[in-house]
Amino acid sequence: MTINLDNKTVFLTGVAGFIGSNLALHLFKNVEGVKIVGIDNMNDYYDVRLKEERLAQVSAYENFTFIKGDIADSGIINDIFSKYHPEVVVNLAAQAGVRYSIINPDAYIQSNLIGFYNILEACRHSYDDGSKGVEHLVYASSSSVYGSNKKIPYSTDDKVDNPVSLYAATKKSNELMAHAYSKLYNIPSTGLRFFTVYGPCGRPDMAYFGFTNKLVKGETIKIFNYGNCKRDFTYVDDIVEGVTRVMQNAPDRLTGDDGLPMPPYKVYNIGNSNPENLLDFVSILQEELVRAGVLPPDYDFESHKELVPMQPGDVPVTFADTSALERDFGFKPSTPLRVGLRRFAEWYVGYYKS
C-alpha cells in the first residue's frame, strides 16, 4: 500500500536520538507539509548535550511539536494519539546498546518492551469507532537479533531464536509483538533491522565515537576479539533514506484462504552489505582524524591500541543481506566507510574544537 506523506502527521519516538533527529530533518526538507510530533525522554545514557543539539535543529521547523516524555508512560502515548491522530508512526525510541543491557536490564524492559507495547495498543485503538487510524507502523529492530548465527550474510529468512544479549531479546520480542498485533488488528507494520549506524553527531557509546574521545584524551582504546571482528557499518543518511522509503510503502492488508486477515507485516535488513574488519576500520578512522585535525599528524596510535578478548553479548561478525530491501524499494545503502568517517571527523572538529 503506497502512502503519500505530504501533509501527513507522523508520530516519531526517540526524536532527539541519532537516527530519529536525522529522519525528522530529512522529512521536513523533502516532504511537503509534513507534521511531526516527536517524543523523547532525553535520558542521560550518553551526553544529553548531543540530544539537545539535535533537538534544536529539528525545532527550527514550525511543523514540529516536541513532547518530553517516556513511551513507557501509557498516559502520555494515549494523549498524543487522541490529540494529534498520527497517520504514520515511527518507533525509534529504545534503550540501545548490547553491553549496557548487562549493567542495567531494567531500562530495556521499560523502554523496549513496555514502551513498544504502549505504541502497539495506541495503534490498535486508533481504529476505534470506525476511525481511519494508523496507516503504517515502522519500528526499529536490530542486527543483534541474529546473535551468533554462523550463516552469513544475515537474511530475514534466518531463524533468530538464540539471542546473546537482553537487548537482542527485546528487539526480537518487538518483532513478535508487532506480528501478533498485525494479525489480530490488521495494523500494517514494518520492522527494520539496523546494522551498526554511524555518522556526525552520533552516539558516543558506539566504537567510532568512543575511540575518538579516548584518543583525544590520550587514553588507550580496546579492540575486541583481538581485532578479528567484522561490522557492517551503515552511514546514517543511508539509514534515513531507507526508513523514508519504507514509511511510504506499508504491507498490504490481504485476506487469507481462511477468510481471515493475513498479517500486513514485514521485516527488512538495512545495512551496507560490506563488513569491515575492525583493525581496517580503526586505521581509516585514525587517518581521517589526523586529516580533519582532530589529532596531530605525529600521533602514536600503536601505543594507544590494546587488543583484548571478546566482550559478553558481542558477536564476531555482522553482515546484512539487503536483497529484499533492494527488491521492494529499489534502494541499497552505499556510502563508503571512509566517506562516512570523514564526515564524522569534520563534524567532530567543528563541534568539540570550537
Image: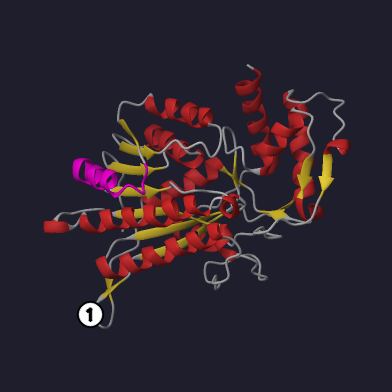
Of 7 and 100, nearer the camera is 100
Q: Quadrant of the C terminus?
A: top right
Q: Quadrant of the N terminus?
A: bottom left
Of 340 and 117, nearer the camera is 117
Q: Name the spot of residue 71 as percent of width and height, x first.
A: 36, 47
Tell me: 246 left or right of 226. Answer: left
Q: Is residue 321 above or below residue 235?
A: below
Q: Which residues are magenta?
A: 70-85
Q: Residues within 10 Å of mark 1 (few under 14, many from 20)?
A: few
The main secondary structure of the magenta stretch is: helix
Residue drawn where x is 48% and y is 45% of the image: 241
Residue drawn where x is 79% and y is 29% of the image: 218
- Residue on which the image places disc 1: 259
Of 279 and 83, nearer the camera is 83
Q: Name the spot of residue 79 as percent of width and height, x first.
A: 23, 43
- Indicate yes or no whether the magenta region holds residue 223: no
Of 51 and 59, nearer the camera is 51
Residue extending furthest left?
A: 129
